[in-house]
Image: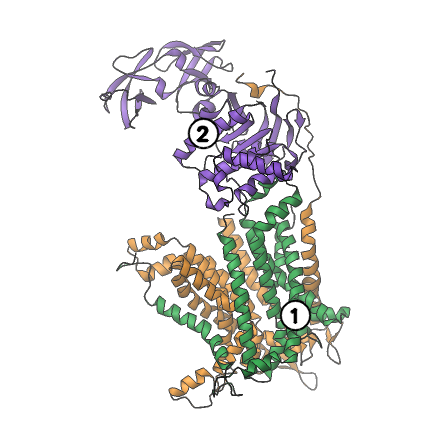
Amino acid sequence: MSQQNAVEVIDVSKNFGVFQALRSVSFDIQENEFFTMLGPSGCGKTTLLRMMAGFETPDTGSLRLQDRDIVDIPPHKRRVNTVFQSYALFPHMSLEQNVAFGLENLGWDKARIKARVGEMLERVHMDQFAKRKPAQLSGGQRQRVALARALAPEPQVLLLDEPLSALDLKLRQAMRDELRSLQRDTGITFVFVTHDQEEALDMSDRIAVLGSGEVQQIGTPSQIYEEPVNRFVADFVGETNFFDVDVLEANDNKAKVRTPFGQVIEIPAPVDVSRGKATLSIRPEKLNLGDQVQGIDFTAEVRHKHYLGGYTHYVLDAGGTEIRASRRNASREGDTISVGSQVHVGFVQNSARVLAS
Amino acid sequence: MSTKHDVKRYPGLGALSVAFFVYLYAPLLVVIIYSFNANRITGVWTEFSVKWYGSALNNKALMAALETSLIVAVIATVVATSIALMAALAIIRGKNVRFRKVSETVVNLPLLLPEIVLAVATLILFSLIGLQNGLLKLVIAHSAFCTPFAFLPIRARLQGMSLDFEEAATDLYATRWTTFRRVTLPLIFPGLFSGAMLAFLISMDDFITSNMLASGGSTTLPVYIFSLIRAGTSPELNAIATLLIVASLILATIALTVASRGARDDI
Amino acid sequence: MSDTAHTAHASAGASPARRRPLNLAYLGLLPSWLIMGFALLLPILIVAAVSVSTRGAYGGFEWGFDLTGYSQILFNEGWEGEMEFTPQYLIIILRTIVLAALTTLLCLVLAVPVSYFIAQQSSSRKALLVYLVTLPFWMSLILRVYAWMIILGKDGPLPRFLEVFGAPSGLSLMYNDGATLAAMVYTYIPLMVLPVFASIEKLDGTLIEAAHDLYGNRWVTLRRVILPLTAPGIISGAILVFVPALGAVLEPILMGGGKQMMMGSLIQLQFGGGRNWPFGSAIAVMLLVFVMIVLIILALRAARKEAAA
């Protein structure tokens, strides 16, 4: 970590009345990183983003932008720009005027502004609409203009507040690629806020999962998905099954546990797991079903079956515990499991994870 | 879309509504028609004539009253709209403002209280403090009761306007003043405009207060018209009324068009 | 690496006092407080004071505590100082309340069906009709009353029309409570239609369909679905009409003539020809109290609803 940090969040707390939006949150965002704050609504992610932009002030703690404390700096003096969830394109100005707005306030000269506006609109493929008003654009087009407007002043950090949430599914997926390549090409640090875990996993270099005003975990997308540090993260990101287990022994990120099906196995665990009651988490796609299965093995009854084309989801009953499993339909005749039948369920040890209860 | 059993339709509504609009406009039409009557007696039609328009336009007292009304209305509109704009910005956009609700009620008070009470109240006040200048009395009173009419459309517009635009402006390095001038003001303009128009019309139209405060040299148009009505209906009065109806029609159309165009903007 | 969140940082800059710029909001409110305070609140206090003062010898008033202004509403002081009950002002007060209530009721009866009809039209026709409803409101009030003087007056269109059906010639329908009522309904109706229309337009059409689907006929649907859901618009329309109707001045003066006074025209008279300021102020205070009672009842209702929600 010899790199300079783009943003440092240091021990930040914020209350709105009795509601604790943020409880002493600390983390760093590195230069040139696509950093995502992921969490359910009310987790504090938008509050944090708005603090970086300067629209909220922390009750305690501080924020640093490239080694400079910015808490007392008003929004118009911070070299950060925001892509608003609503885009907030000025309806009375043309696209050109919208993109030029920030540059004018920075005091650029006219020729330079003109060149930069043209360049940015071209960059987002909106140059032919330069004279139009925002009302004449589709949602996807507005999104691009909002990006161009925020990127034009070359901010030190670009803040994106759920920018894809207003778009339809197809467009959203196309915009993910576009956002990602914009970030790579410009080298600007992106701080992205979303509640959509798929978006977060797809685009981010690193993800901070926030829940109830606290950072639950920070890591790469695969760390977040495969090595969740607690129940909240395992539950919020992706789907999972939880079982109650007894931890017999725990050390070195490993724990020896007794499963509800009788076996004693050793599986990965975060450091805070200790002897006693704990939770075992295993993702539905990590379970394999059939007459013969690999790894740890138990039997269950098929309760419901949801055929979804590419996948089939099963709801199983293993001695009173509900389990969800999913199987890819790799061949046409693949699905031979019927509702009411008994199946073997298995998983390999390192695909499961033990979490503190 | 119309079917035999459109449950949302009630029989007879159409006819009733047509009758309603006839009711709304027939009286105005009657005044307009009679203004072209050559006969001095309003109710007795003889022949078509525009001579009463000539005598209306040559009526010096009428023109003086119109001038007084315009002076008072223009000043009161500027004052009331400025006060209303400042109050609306403070109430809707201000942070940590105490007395927000009370302030809003105070601004709207002239709407809630009977005008005749306010009229006699200002009359007593001005006589107590010995204020003599007729125009000044009118301007002060009109500015006060026009303020809520200017306030309501501005407030509505400001409240309907997402904070995002102003935040986006500051995010793009605009100072407070730049944000106000280049974003807030243009976006609330339709509200500001219809507020000012309303204030102007209310001031032009005011009778109760103006009549109470009227003194020599400060007779406004409605007060003058009232004195004409008191003297008896006349075709010249009908011509004056017609001219004013047409003027209001034009002003109202402009104001309502601007307001509805503004409402269509996506803010 | 995955647990950077819990790495302890030096808690720098944890001072609780953040930038607190001068709150411009209070500066913005100042002018409105000043003008309302000077031209509205202060004068109303003075009216209240004058209402308990003594009538001046040559009009106006003299400071001093005297309830004559109020007692005059019910009693007339005879030659020898005896108090004699006189109903004339009580009748004016009752007329004011009855006419204002009737105006509100008639406006409502007209406004609900018309608003419903407008709400059903296509959006361009809707805009046109709303414009047509609004338009008269922009025209001078005095001219709108004047139009009714012509219509109802001697040789006016309505008496002429009635002559066809055998009414005596030279009939005038002016100078009675009916004439005042006609002008009041006419002048205040836009204030009722607009809010009622706004709430009817917001009404979800499928609710009406659902009511019919559940075996309700048109009458049941109107009574149990449409009216309850448009109640907020109806109530605000009723205030917008009732409050100014209580204070009506021009309509009773021009349409009712000298005899059929309302509180508004009575006050006007006391500060004009009558020159009895304490009595006029007492009536003004009464009128103010009536309006306040209506507004307070409604405010309490609104507060109760808010608390329930």
Q: CA distance from mark 1 to mark 2?
A: 65 Å
* Chain C colour as displayed: orange
Residue at the image position 35 percent from the left and 20 percent from the top: A285
Q: Position of residue A15 (x, y in %)?
A: 59, 34
Can you say whether C227 is above or below C69 in the image? above
Q: Quadrant of the N terminus of chain C?
A: top right
Residue at the image position 58 percent from the left and 62 percent from the top: B197
| Left or right position of B257 against C73 | left
Tag 1's secondary structure? helix
Query: As rendered, which of A190 and A25 lies closer to the eye?
Result: A190
Q: Amino acid at mark 2?
A: Arg
Residue B106 appearing in the image: no
The dot on residue B257 is none
Q: Position of residue A259 (x, y in %)?
A: 38, 14
Residue A339: quarter of image: top left
Residue B68: quarter of image: bottom right
Can you say whether A75 is above or below A248 in the image? below
Residue at the image position 59 percent from the left and 66 percent from the top: B202
| Left or right position of A217 against B108 | left
What residue does disc 1 label? B119
Please tell me whether mark 1 or mark 2 is closer to you in this view: 2
Residue B180 appearing in the image: yes
* Chain B colour as displayed: green
What residue does disc 2 label? A176
Q: Position of residue B114 (x, y in %)?
A: 60, 67
Q: Which chain is purple?
A: A
Residue at the image position 69 percent from the left and 87 percent from the top: C79
